[in-house]
Amino acid sequence: MRGILTYHSVDPSGSAISISEHELRQHIRFFASRRVQIVPLEWLHKVPADRDALAITFDDGFQNFADLAWPLLEHNDLPVTLFVPTERLGGRNDWGGTKHKGIPELPLMSWETVAKLVEHGLTLGSHSRTHPHLETLDDARLERELAGSAEDIEKRTGARPKALCYPFGTFDERCVAVAKKHYEVAVTTELAALPDAPDLHRLPRLDAYYWRGDGLERWGTGSFRRRIAFRALARRVRATLGR
Ligand SMILES: [Zn+2]
């Protein structure tokens, strides 16, 4: 089974975007055992579909990534893609939708910190410039968010990002068309393993939050796949009831 793991924040709040430091260390131990191949995000779809492989992604650029996650990832030589909203760095994740879901508002890294990690081997991806709902933007602003954030990253680090992460996981056909112009791959918040022939600009992911504890150890097994299906169904039911 191939899949992309999503992390956001390493903090003790227990929120839907959070994983504790202890839980992260459990995951890192599993990655470091190399029982499953760990590959850079943009390579994952090239790994044969019958292999067990995963890619690690972190969204938003929280300061706690630099403090807690990066040292462990670097020490164990684990590839990771960090998706940053390029004009929000240095601020906080105050882009709405946080209060009623119990999601903590926390500081994001500065560009200076991000650039330092890139020198040490971190790969950046784009999470747009300002973390908007992309599908609500007019064409000109959409282009600025997607092309502009790639330019920002290239200007700051010398490397053009290959991957995009749609903010809030919301997008429409128009967004996908613009993403295709500027990025090799784009990731969503659809909860699924990688299909055999994935659409490279709608790659599904798996929230690490659902596999806290030693849940990742069963990667690729029947029980692991059933947990994905169950979580995806529960999410659809919640979305329907919430409407
Ligand atoms: Zn985000």
Image: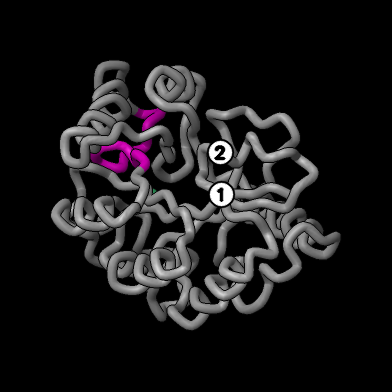
Residue 155 belongs to magenta span: no
Q: Quadrant of residue 103?
A: bottom left
Which amino acid, by three-letter code, is at mark 2? Trp
Find residue 219 and report its horizontal and vertical position in percent.
Answer: 73, 62
Q: Relative to 85, does residue 231 appear above or below in the rendering?
A: below
| Residue at the spot of label 2 | 43
Q: Quadrant of residue 228?
A: bottom right
Residue 126 belongs to magenta span: yes
Marks 2 and 1 in Cβ contact (< 8 Å):
yes
Crowdedness of circle 1 by 10 Å Cα count: few (<14), some, many (20+)? some
Which amino acid, by three-letter code, is at mark 1? Val
Find residue 137 and report its horizontal and vertical position in percent.
Answer: 32, 26
Find residue 210 and report its horizontal and vertical position in percent.
Answer: 62, 66
Find residue 186 and report its horizontal and vertical position in percent.
Answer: 48, 34
Q: Nearer the viewer, residue 76 or 175?
A: 76
Residue at the image position 66 percent from the left and 77 percent from the top: 214
Residue at the image position 49 percent from the left and 66 percent from the top: 16
Q: Secondary structure at mark 1?
A: loop
The response on whether ligand 1 sits within 8 Å of label 1 is no
Find residue 39 and name its label: 1
With 225 as the anchor, is 184 left or right in this view? Answer: left
Query: Which region is colored magenta?
Result: 125-136
Residue at the image position 24 percent from the left and 52 percent from the top: 119
